[in-house]
Image: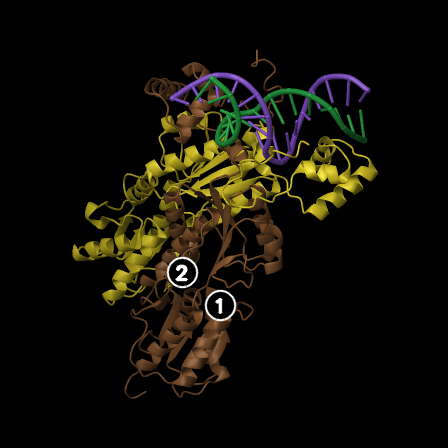
Chain colours: A brown, B yellow, C purple, D green
DNA sequence: CTGTTAGCGCGTTCAC
DNA sequence: GTGAACGCGCTAACAG
């Protein structure tokens, strides 16, 4: 009789013909708890009941309702991942690392995108929290720490790509400064003395760090720093095009460019192509990020690779640790790596 | 007294200090139902109570538990989106379209990736269903219809990028055939008569369609079809490199290539670059997909653009309609478009 | 090893 | 307009 009266308020017109644990139990002739125990594997269940349950599950094609389980356990076994654009090749590797580790711990990732927009980020984060994800990974998030603290409300969070002052969140930063230094040093070692820089938007910390790397390496090598050799590319291709044109139009001589990211490097290369300049013969260029495509640009681009995959793994390990109440392992991320390809070349002796 | 004894089984060591509707109600001095009604806006609530509730919510920083709500209503207001790689520039536009429409209907998207792997796809789909998403959008999924039907179990699904024989699912296909025809016709109109083709993996329907488009357009124009002018690039850059090398090494003359997608076109261009060939002077090339990067390749690539964003919107509208029990609107997708850039050029008179 | 029972947080019916 | 009581599907404590 417990059956009648059920489902008196069905959602709209959709037939929600999903079968429940109770039905499985009834068909198997056992109690719901036994089925539950079988499913979770926490208790031993007798051979025969197991057989009955398995048969029942198969016949009914039963799938546990994760929503109900989440409510009952207080854990959803999912972690929210806030990226900026769900589809963006920069995030690809990091996301893969995250997925791998999470899967191996039986967690699932759900991705949402902040679209490089603080307000949007906040909304998505709140939604994740409302959805009761067990933890959150923020990729290149721009949220205030205060907002974080306000929304986090005990949800373990780890930042990837940004330092957070808050002690409540675990953060894994990138070493933009060192990467930029290596890029510029590479050019200097090739004999370049006049090196231009296509910067990122200076309201971003990473852009500032890369700028500093450029500046400091120049100075450390006894080379003059000239503001007129710097132009803003805003991290995008079109910005790279205009930045390169600006640089060239200023008329100051230079034999190499360091672009703050690969996208702007692509743009710069297009600008040079249009002027009939050849890379690396007329100009060397090095990018940053080592996007997948950089192996196939013309010419293939020398670039600074960040161990994105590994960082993704680190981040995932950290949330899981946090969720399970352990101390997150201290980050032991692989070093940055300068991938030398064909866009850089020793400066000609005459130059 | 109903308070004591609660939460006797707390999850691990995490403080789950999320506050509940009941606490809001108590602080506001009303019943839970009233708060619930206020939240859903389905019933009228008196001015004063509204004020009390709003104050209470603000003070407590209350966030509804979407998990509980999902269990109670039977709807989660989320739709699952199965892509192949969460981060892949090909999906970027489509995903944006999906997000837009979903958001405007108060649904949320959760993304999972199938990694071009049928088994993985199935697993992810089951997980989505277990999570009780209200609907599912499959991007370029490769699942059998039988599996679909088995797992779908009343969950509205729409395919994007693949025709499904099943009548239970709504599918929005791409017109690969027409796109390929346009690409090849463009080359023919430029005077090319020997046109090579870098194909995709022939176990994919879209690859076959593009092949057919190439073949049929050639034939329709009275041009011979020569198998030796076809090589498999597998839709990836490295494949494009080897395919182009294969084509060139065969020694047959040709003045243009149609690559089944942009990635393989990039590869082909690299192969030519290595041989000192110039695009478009020595060889014209047209790609397919019009990836964002194609505006910035050297030279910028002529390519067939699919209205991905619009298709994403269509797909999302369709799921929502299906979920709410309406008939999905008949697809009215924008036409394919050939974007002519600088990688194609009229064949030299002497050639 | 197993059934019974209570409760997760919320929406909703049913009476007022 | 509003509160009491019940149920969504599942897990976990309690007693065997």
Count neighbours of disc 2 (C-alpha within 10 A) and say few if under 14, some if 14 to 19, many if 20 or more: some
Secondary structure type for disc 2: loop
Q: Which residue is drawn at 31% across and 66% down?
A: A300
The image quarter containing residue A25 is: top left
Determine the residue located farthest toward the top in the rendered image: A1
Question: Which mark sits nearer the N-terminus, 1 or 2?
Answer: 1
Secondary structure type for disc 1: helix
Q: What residue did someone put label 2 on? A: A331
Q: Which residue is drawn at 42% across and 14% down?
A: A29
Percent of width and height locating residue B299: 37, 64
Q: Which mark is residue A291?
A: none
Q: In this view, does B300 lie to the left or right of B106?
A: left
Determine the residue located farthest toward the left in the rendered image: B250
A196 in relation to B23, above or below: below
The CA span between labels 1 and 2 is: 19 Å
Percent of width and height locating residue A163: 51, 64
Percent of width and height locating residue A154: 57, 49
Q: Residue at x 19, y 54 (%)?
A: B246
Q: What residue did someone put label 1 on? A: A206
Count neighbours of disc 1 (C-alpha within 10 A) and say few if under 14, some if 14 to 19, many if 20 or more: many
A339 in relation to A310, above or below: below
Chain assignment, label 2? A
């Amino acid at each position: 009789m417990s059956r009648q009266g059920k489902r008196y308020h069905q959602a709209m017109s959709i037939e929600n013909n999903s079968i429940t644990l109770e039905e499985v139990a009834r068909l198997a002739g056992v109690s719901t708890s036994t089925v539950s125990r079988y499913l979770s594997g926490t208790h031993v269940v007798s051979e025969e009941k197991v057989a009955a349950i398995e048969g029942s599950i198969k016949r009914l094609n039963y799938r546990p309702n994760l929503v109900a389980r989440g409510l009952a356990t207080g854990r959803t076994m999912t972690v929210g991942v806030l990226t900026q654009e769900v589809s963006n090749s920069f995030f690809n590797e990091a996301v893969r690392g995250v997925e791998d580790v999470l899967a191996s711990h039986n967690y699932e990732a759900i991705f949402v995108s902040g679209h490089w927009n603080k307000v949007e980020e906040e909304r998505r984060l709140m939604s994740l929290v409302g959805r009761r994800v067990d933890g959150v990974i923020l990729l290149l998030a721009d949220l205030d720490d205060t907002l974080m603290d306000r929304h986090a409300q005990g949800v373990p969070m780890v930042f990837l790509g940004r330092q957070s002052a808050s002690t409540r969140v675990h953060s894994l930063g990138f070493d933009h400064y060192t990467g930029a230094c290596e890029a510029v040093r590479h050019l200097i070692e090739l004999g370049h003395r006049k090196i231009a820089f296509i910067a990122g938007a200076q309201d971003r910390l990473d852009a500032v760090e890369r700028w500093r790397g450029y500046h400091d390496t120049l100075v450390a090598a006894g080379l003059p720093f000239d503001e007129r050799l710097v132009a803003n590319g805003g991290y995008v291709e079109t910005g790279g095009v205009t930045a390169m044109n600006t640089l060239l139009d200023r008329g100051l001589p230079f034999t190499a460019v360091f672009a703050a990211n690969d996208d702007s490097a692509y743009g710069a290369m297009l600008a040079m192509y249009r002027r009939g300049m050849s890379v690396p013969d007329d100009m060397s260029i090095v990018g940053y990020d080592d996007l997948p495509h950089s192996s196939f640009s013309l010419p293939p681009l020398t670039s600074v690779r960040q161990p994105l995959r590994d960082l993704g793994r680190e981040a995932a390990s950290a949330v899981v640790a946090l969720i399970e109440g352990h101390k997150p392992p201290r980050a032991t991320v692989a070093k940055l790596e300068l991938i030398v390809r064909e866009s850089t070349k020793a400066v000609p002796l005459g130059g």
